[in-house]
Amino acid sequence: MTWDAKSIEWIFSGIGVLAVSGVVYLIRKWFSKSEPMQSGFTNSIVINQTNSGALGLPQGPVDQSISSANATKPKSGLAILFVDDDTKFKVVSILKNHGWLNTRIIRDVTSLEQPEVASADILFVDIQGVGKILQFKDEGLGLVVALKRKYPGKKVVIYSAENGINAFHAAFKHADDRINKDADPYEFIEVVERLLE
């Protein structure tokens, strides 16, 4: 076998590509470690804590590492509560199957401070058949208003299968979103994702 200039060029181009790929891999690996590699070089940025707020920077230590566990944490950590007298509402299990593991359903609210309500980040409230225990005149609509007044930071979504709803009720001003109870499950997922933006 004879080695001509093209053969040698081909070998070195393949080796060259492999060598460059190896260097890129090592650099990426070096930067992805949470602790800096022990070398002669150190990079550090010091921000005066008293001035960082004035600059619009977050106060205190900030963890900027990204991992797959942190990327899924919002889904698994987010508490979604459905208030519905039909406790077999299928969307609850579908949300769980899509990764929203902390999704629950209760028949009605017995107290605005009950643990399920207090710990929920997003509440879906059916407007028929709920709110009766707390004797809201407008059932679920009254419950929505009370929940938003008690917990203004929580997201509250109205849903119903009935079409003849009082569209001028104050609950529609207070609610963060609304959806038809007969909507496809993916639409409920879209509502959750939209509320997280």
Image (cartoon, helix red, strand yellow):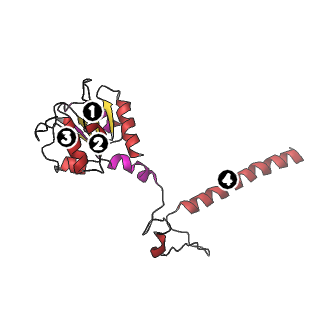
Residue drawn at the location 48% of the way across and 56% of the way down: 66
Quarter of the figure that contains the N terminus? top right
Between 74 and 2, the residue placed more toward the observer is 74
Spatial distance from mark 1 to mark 4, Cα to Cα? Answer: 63 Å
Spatial distance from mark 3 to mark 4, Cα to Cα? Answer: 60 Å
Q: Earlier in the sequence, mark 3 or mark 4?
A: 4
Q: Secondary structure at mark 1?
A: loop
Give amino acid for label 2.
His
- Name the residue at the front extreme: 168
- Name the residue at the top extreme: 163
What number is the disc on residue 139? none
Packing grade of label 4 (10 A; few <14, some 14-19, many >=20) is: few
Q: Nearer the viewer, mark 2 or mark 4?
A: 2
Give amino acid for label 1.
Phe
| Spot occupied by residue 6 in the image (x, y as percentages of width and height) | 86, 45
Residue drawn at the location 48% of the way across and 73% of the way down: 51
Packing grade of label 2 (10 A; few <14, some 14-19, many >=20) is: many
Res. 190 image quadrant: top left
Q: Is residue 38 above or below residue 4?
A: below
What number is the disc on residue 174? 2
Q: Residue at label 3? A: 143
Which residues lie in the magenta part? 67-96
Between 120 and 150, the residue placed more toward the observer is 150
On the picture, is 23 further left or further right than 77? right
What number is the disc on residue 168? 1
